[in-house]
Amino acid sequence: MEFRPSMRRSARVSVRIPVAVTGTLPDGKPFTEQTYVMTVSKFGARLKCRHPLTLGMQIRVKPNAANTDGLFQVVWVGGALNPGEAGIQYVKPSNLFGVAFPD
């Protein structure tokens, strides 16, 4: 077995944080969905979404327990192996989900 160091910029933490996701689909229709974040990192998160998110699209994510939201860009979509999942990255770095990471 070959050892390869992680290429990730930050550790991932498994969570289940209820959130509201809003955005505009490629056909121009706005959407809002209640869902949850599955993992968080210093730079973003992975979430479940029933709507067809596409690479590069921007969405707003608001934790249900918070008074503020954050703007994210979709950087990964799950495809056949992880349907309904998407990786999102902060447009402006933040700690929206309240998980502390070392600098």
Image (spheres, rainbow, N blue to C red):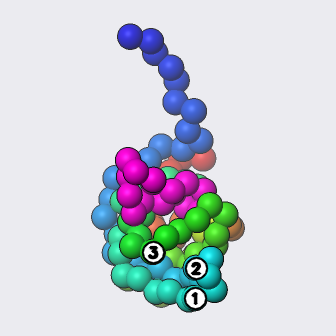
Is residue 45 among the parts visible in the rendering?
Answer: no
Q: Residue at x 51, y 56 (%)?
A: 77
Residue 8 in picture, x, y percent from top left: 55, 38
Say if 83 sits above or below 53 in the image.
above
Residue sitting nearer the eye, 19 or 30: 30
> Does label 2 or label 3 sit earlier along the sequence?
2
Read off the magenta span. Answer: 74-90
Residue 20 in picture, x, y percent from top left: 43, 81
Q: Residue at x 35, y 75 (%)?
A: 35
Q: Is residue 85 located in the magenta-colored stretch of the structure?
A: yes
Q: Is residue 67 located in the magenta-colored stretch of the structure?
A: no
Instruction: Please state which amino acid type lies under the numbered disc 3.
Output: His
* Label 2 to label 3: alpha-carbon separation: 8 Å
Residue 5 in picture, x, y percent from top left: 52, 23
Pointer 1 and pointer 2: residues touching (CB < 8 Å)? yes
> Does label 1 or label 3 sit earlier along the sequence?
1
Location of mark 1 (residue): 29
Can you say which quadrant of the picture contains the N terminus? top left
Residue 25 badge: 2
The number of numbered discs placed on residues in the rendered structure image is 3
Location of mark 3 (residue): 51
Which type of secondary structure does the marked residue at label 3 adopt? loop
Instruction: Please state which amino acid type lies under the numbered disc 1.
Output: Lys
Q: Residues within 10 Å of mark 1 (few under 14, many from 20)?
A: few
Q: Residue at x 39, y 63 (%)?
A: 84
Which type of secondary structure does the marked residue at label 2 adopt? loop
Q: Residue at x 50, y 20 (%)?
A: 4
Which type of secondary structure does the marked residue at label 1 adopt? loop
